[in-house]
Image (cartoon, rainbow, N blue to C red):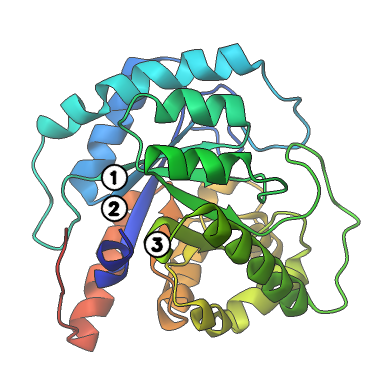
Amino acid sequence: MKAALQAFPRVMGIVNVNDDSFSGDGTLDVEHALRQASQMVQDGADIIDVGAESARTNRGAIEIEEEIARLLPFIDSFETVCAEVKPRDELQMWPPLLSVNTWRPEIVEAVLKTGSVDLINDIGGMVEDSNARLCFEFGASLLIMHTVGQPKVAHLEQRYDDIWESLEGFFDDRIARANKIGLSEDHIVLDPGIDFAKQSEDNLRIFSSLERLQQYGLPVLLPISRKTVIGDVLGIENPRERDAGTVACLVRGLAGGANIFRVHNVKAAADCVRVIAAIRNEPVHSQS
């Protein structure tokens, strides 16, 4: 997977099978969610990231059984949906990968048992090793996101003497633990965790020095879509009005070596990466 993710900038489309997405685009209608995914794939999404529980910290966690019940019908139909459409162009990863955004081991195990999930997008920060062990057992890849504390808990007062010292210490530890479990570099993706347990100034420092993550030689996912830091900089309260700022973050991410960009507006992101690739006249490597 590593080679495919690093061959060309990858766009990850966000699908929320819930009714409390911060961006207001969630749905509990699985057929509607699948139509959203289909359109994103046609627009150029290389990966679809489906989640059933909002990461918003002003909401409690939903029941494990409810999250599984929301996810499985989508996962079961995803391959069929992709088979009904054609790739946007030769640059798109095909077939697109399926990622599941979750953090509780019971849910990770349930979705991996389907055999249809390529990546676990774990917002839990690998506090313990269960999800890494499950990914190794089922041959899936694991996204390791920098954060502190537990998911679904606000960390509004979190402060860092040096955000990069925290990031590098965190990833040094988590990568070593994942490797010890058996996950190779082909099955690990890093995420600096924009807006998770961070203040706006922390996020901006991450963007400004993003190249530092290249020391690990692993694919880097940048979750840029409609983030609070964009709203803070531009004074825009409505997340849906932050797409221009999202594209600005994408351009900076490309310059900093990021490989995957998690977005709501797939068409804008896919257009952006293709224009920049053309400007750079970059050769395209293997897409599979």
Image coordinates for residue 36, horizontal then vertical, percent? 32, 31
Question: How far apart are the alpha carbons under marks 1 and 3?
Answer: 12 Å
Q: Which amino acid does label 2 sit on?
A: Lys
Q: Name the disc covering residue 97, or none.
A: 1
Q: Earlier in the sequence, mark 2 or mark 3?
A: 3
Q: In which quadrant of the rendered image does the N terminus lie? A: bottom left
Mark 1 Cα-neighbour bin, 10 Å: few <14, some 14–19, many ≥20? some
Q: Name the disc covering residue 260, or none.
A: 3
Front position among marks 2 and 3: 3
- Determine which residue is flagged by label 2: 267
Vertical side of 243 occupied by 32: above or below: above
Picture residue at 44% right of the left edge, 27% below the top: 111
SS category of the residue bearing label 2: helix
Q: Residue 250's quadrant in the figure?
A: bottom left
Question: How far apart are the alpha carbons under marks 2 and 1?
Answer: 17 Å
Q: Nearer the viewer, residue 152 or 215?
A: 215
